[in-house]
């Protein structure tokens, strides 16, 4: 092999480490979650809940915003790997918009929704509690209905692309059980809302805007599981890990919503309900890992093709 060919091959061989930042995402999340566990233990030992509150106001908020930023950056990188006009270019365009909504929503709910912690704007003289409340409402809307609606659109475009290519798989029994359980929760949730309205409850606009979120999550879970099974049918690899990560993230968000629902109706009481706060950390990690795994698939494919071209007789 000529020296120039060896240099070309070595350039791609250096891409063996995860190009999608998988290891970095896992390492940073593990460190922050460990800090959260320490805060929880300190709370249990001292009886001072301030340990946990301070963790989520600064380290926890930083992690969630950072994960949302990484997710958005990686979805843009994945989108650029597909030529304009391709179905997957369109799909990842929708997914990147979803990630952008998550980033903006996290900035609003984790930073601007409080008068302390990381919110430097709270030091302004015209900042009020109403300002924090407004940003919280905007953040919940962006990170809820808009985020999951756009993500559902992206996943449905991907499902159609797999179907047209003849790679669409089938859900397994465990997948169907998860979907039935999630669907049952949504039915119970809407039944409780209907009873509350009959008893005189008047839901606000933000609450009404949140009603489609859990049905969207069930739809997303079905789409992500279907794509995971389809990718697994093409052979084990990083592609299937992408959709597995989305499935895990969506399932964790659903579990978090179940926890909030149980807390709201008194089935889960303090301090047990505080465990629900921690669910959003691995959920954010799973959503950031999804495009990281997909980018790794592409980089490994490019690597394999480049090395094959170097070693080919022509």
Image (tube, rainbow, N blue to C red):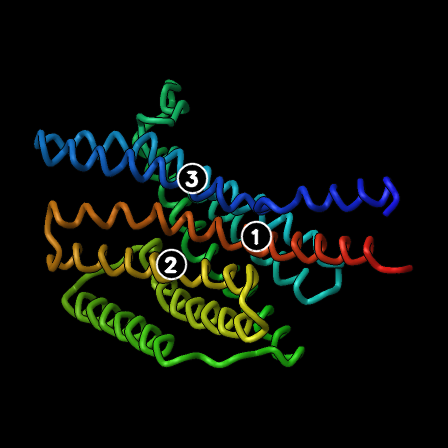
Q: Position of residue 236 (x, y in %)?
A: 54, 67
Q: Height in image: 96 above or below 240?
A: above
Read off the residue under disc 3: 27
Read off the residue under disc 1: 97
- Mark 3 and mark 2 residues within 8 Å of each other at the beta carbon: no
Mark pair 1, 2: CA separation: 19 Å
Read off the residue under disc 2: 209
Residue at 36% of width from left, 24% of height from top? 122
Q: Is residue 122 left or right of residue 295?
A: left
N-terminal label among 1 and 2: 1
Q: Position of residue 18 (x, y in %)?
A: 57, 46
Residue at 77% of width from left, 53% of height from top? 306
Quadrant of residue 157 within the rendered picture: bottom right
Quadrant of residue 225 within the rendered picture: bottom left
Can residue 282 be seen by looking at this rendering?
yes
Task: Select label 3 or label 1 by which is in front.
Answer: 3
- Crowding at mark 1 (Cα within 10 Å: few <14, some 14-19, many 20+): some
């Amino acid at each position: 092999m000529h020296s120039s060919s060896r240099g070309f091959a070595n350039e791609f061989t250096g891409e063996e480490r995860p190009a999608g930042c998988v290891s970095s995402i896992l390492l940073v999340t593990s460190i922050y979650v460990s800090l959260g566990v320490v805060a929880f233990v300190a709370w249990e030992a001292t009886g001072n809940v301030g340990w946990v509150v301070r963790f989520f106001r600064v380290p926890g908020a930083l992690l969630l915003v950072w994960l949302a930023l990484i997710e958005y950056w990686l979805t843009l990188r994945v989108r650029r790997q597909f030529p304009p006009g391709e179905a997957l270019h369109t799909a990842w365009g929708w997914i990147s918009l979803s990630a952008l909504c998550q980033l903006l929503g996290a900035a609003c709910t984790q930073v601007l929704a409080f008068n302390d912690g990381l919110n430097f704007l709270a030091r302004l003289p015209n900042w009020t509690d109403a300002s924090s409340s407004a940003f919280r409402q905007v953040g919940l809307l962006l990170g809820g209905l808009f985020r999951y609606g756009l993500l559902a659109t992206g996943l449905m475009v991907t499902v159609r692309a797999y179907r047209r290519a003849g790679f669409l798989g089938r859900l397994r029994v465990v997948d169907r059980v998860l979907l039935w359980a999630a669907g049952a929760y949504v039915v119970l949730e809407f039944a409780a809302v209907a009873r509350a309205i009959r008893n005189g409850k008047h839901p606000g606009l933000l609450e009404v805007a949140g009603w489609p979120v859990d049905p969207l999550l069930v739809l997303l879970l079905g789409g992500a599981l279907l794509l995971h099974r389809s990718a697994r049918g093409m052979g084990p690899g990083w592609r299937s890990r992408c959709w597995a990560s989305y499935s895990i993230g969506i399932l964790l968000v659903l579990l978090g919503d179940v926890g909030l629902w149980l807390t709201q109706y008194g089935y889960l009481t303090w301090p047990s309900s505080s465990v629900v706060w921690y669910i959003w950390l691995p959920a954010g990690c799973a959503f950031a890992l999804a495009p990281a795994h997909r980018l790794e698939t592409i980089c490994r494919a490019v690597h394999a093709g480049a090395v094959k071209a170097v070693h080919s007789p022509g």
